[in-house]
Image (cartoon, rainbow, N blue to C red):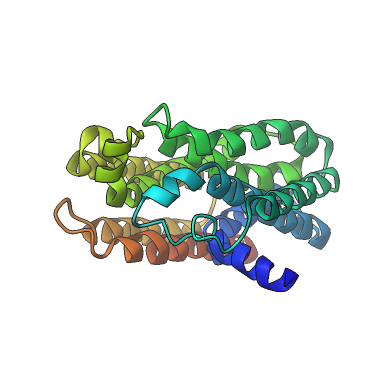
Amino acid sequence: MGLRKLKVILEMIKFEHSLFALPFAFMGAVLGSIVVENAWPTWSEIFWVTVAMVGARSAAMSLNRVIDRVIDARNPRTVTRAIPAGLISIMEVILFIVVSFAVLFIAAYQLNDLAVKLLPLAVFVLVLYSYTKRFTWLCHFVLGVAIGFGPLGGWVATTGQVDGIGLLLFASVMFWTAGFDIIYACQDADFDRKEGLYSMPSRFGIANALLIARVCHVLTFVGLMSLYVVADLSIWFLVGVLISGAILIYEHTLVKPTDLSKLDMAFFNMNGILSVVMFTFTMIDLVIA
């Protein structure tokens, strides 16, 4: 029974979508270690970065499902999720949240003092995000901050500091996340408007929201290009940035104000590919250099 419940929770939080955030966290850890320390991160650091990311994302997604359970039950798109469908109890999910946060805390303590000091801020943003669509259409950027803490956390894990290059990586991922979350929210624009929930699509309309998402992704590209310059990286990193830019352009051709039928492909497939591409070309750059 316990394993079946765990499977339900992992399906509920889309555990496999950790692919979005993990490559950027690894990118932050490796890039920070090479740029600042002039050495590769240890396997211990990589292990605890992975544990921290899994714990943080699992806690955040589970919290979101608990906090939004009433809203999910009213939304035709989400009514079949585990909690509104009665597949799992709230207390079982809360237990999983407690364990996930404990895993995050343990991982931070295994890294360094700054990681521990920044932990309350990270937890605050993770908890705050699930409430933001009740009072601000900037909720997408709060999610961006939460996901952006992944690469910044990786940077802190191996360097023990926050600097301009680490913040540039954080900002790039923040705008990337906000952009694709705005796209994803387009499918709930009518529901959000009817329920009095806040999002870019419900506030400004789908066409304008998609335009804002494009601006976010232009800023992502600019941020990654700036990272290439200030971190003095090689042509291989630039190739990764250019491929990522092409992926973002293609992503925006898949969604139109009058046709959201390819939204899942734009949201899941393209963004998963982009994060892997950026990490791969970062590694090629650093290994060859």
Where does the image place residue 268, in percent across and percent down from the top left?
A: 41, 63
> 95 or 32, which is in the foreground?
95
Seen at 40% across and 31% down, the residue is 138
Above-or-below relation of 220 to 282: above
Q: Residue furthest front?
A: 86
With 231 as the anchor, is 195 left or right in this view?
left
With 227 as the anchor, is 213 left or right in this view?
left
**Is residue 28 visible to the viewer in this orientation of the structure?**
no
In the rendered image, which quarter contains the C terminus? bottom right
With 43 as the anchor, is 18 left or right in this view?
left
In the rendered image, which quarter contains the N terminus? bottom right
Where does the image place residue 31, in percent across and percent down from the top left?
A: 64, 51
> 168 or 62, which is in the foreground?
62
Q: Quadrant of residue 210?
A: top left
With 158 as the anchor, is 61 left or right in this view?
left
Q: Quadrant of residue 41?
A: bottom right
